[in-house]
Image: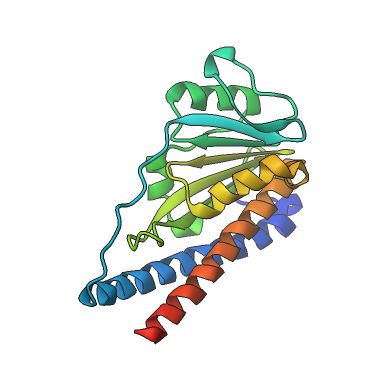
């Protein structure tokens, strides 16, 4: 599906940000792997990668502070601007699809999507998949797909890991609800957080390599 005229300004900016994040994540991953190899030669030890969190569905917005939503209630708060699905169950996926009227991509679908198809529009909703970096601090870098669905004034994120910038953004959203006042604002601020984190990691890894 092609992005329509009305969505092109935001879609163009998001497409550029997506391409930059994917390239940066891959570059940092290569650098960290190389640095970790050199560090091991110096006798430094790796730490275990963090375990996955429990499955959950949380909502953030003007009157939402990251509350857990029980899919059995069959309802998502009307003022929830950001709906975050972490390792969602089938019931949680169905609840979001029912209430937000969007398709929730699975982990397999996000992992298999071609780079040229990572941004598209379907039934008025904007879909995007990015490769987020994780495991850098543990010297076990990898990328994980994170799905974004912007439907009107609501943002839905789908993920199967918790990269540090997302965890940090969650904490900020609880303290400052202005950054999740609506879906577009939450999307831009969350992408900013991911990009800033990538920039920091590139700088840190480069400095480490220079010192070895």
Q: Is residue 22 above or below residue 205?
A: above
- Residue drawn at point x = 63 percent, y = 52 percent: 190
Q: Is residue 122 above or below residue 133?
A: above
- Residue drawn at point x = 22 percent, y = 72 percent: 43
Give coordinates of residue 38: x percent, y percent.
27, 77
- Viewer-proximal residue among 84 and 176: 176
Quarter placement of the C terminus: bottom left
Q: Quadrant of residue 154?
A: top right
- Viewer-proximal residue among 31 and 45: 45
Give coordinates of residue 103: x percent, y percent.
54, 33
- Image position of 100 (left or right of 166): right
Q: Quadrant of residue 200?
A: bottom right
Q: Is residue 189 above or below residue 148?
A: below
Report whether residue 85 is seen.
yes
- Image position of 64 (left or right of 104): right
Give coordinates of residue 109: x percent, y percent.
41, 42
- Viewer-proximal residue among 134 and 41: 41
**Count of number-bearing discs:** 0
- Image position of 190 (left or right of 178): left
- Residue drawn at point x = 67 percent, y = 56 percent: 11
Q: What colour-coding does the image apply?
A: rainbow
Report whether residue 19 is seen.
no
- Residue drawn at point x = 74 percent, y = 38 percent: 153
């Amino acid at each position: 599906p092609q992005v329509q005229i009305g969505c092109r300004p935001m879609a163009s900016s998001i497409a550029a940000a997506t391409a930059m994040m994917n390239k940066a994540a891959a570059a940092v991953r290569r650098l960290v792997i190389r640095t970790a190899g050199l560090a091991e030669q110096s006798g430094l030890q790796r730490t275990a990668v963090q375990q996955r969190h429990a499955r959950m569905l949380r909502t953030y917005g003007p009157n939402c502070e990251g509350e857990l939503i029980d899919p059995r209630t069959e309802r998502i708060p009307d003022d929830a601007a950001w709906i975050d699905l972490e390792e969602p169950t089938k019931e949680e996926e169905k609840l979001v699809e029912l209430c937000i009227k969007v398709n929730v991509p699975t982990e397999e679908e996000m992992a298999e999507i071609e780079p040229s198809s990572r941004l598209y529009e379907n039934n008025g909703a904007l879909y995007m998949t990015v490769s987020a970096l994780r495991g850098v601090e543990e010297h076990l870098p990898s990328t994980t797909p994170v799905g974004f669905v912007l439907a009107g004034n609501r943002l839905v994120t789908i993920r199967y890991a918790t990269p540090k910038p997302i965890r940090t953004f969650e904490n900020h959203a609880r303290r400052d609800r202005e950054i999740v006042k609506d879906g577009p604002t939450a999307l831009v601020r969350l992408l900013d957080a991911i990009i800033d984190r990538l920039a920091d990691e590139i700088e840190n890894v480069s400095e480490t390599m220079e010192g070895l």
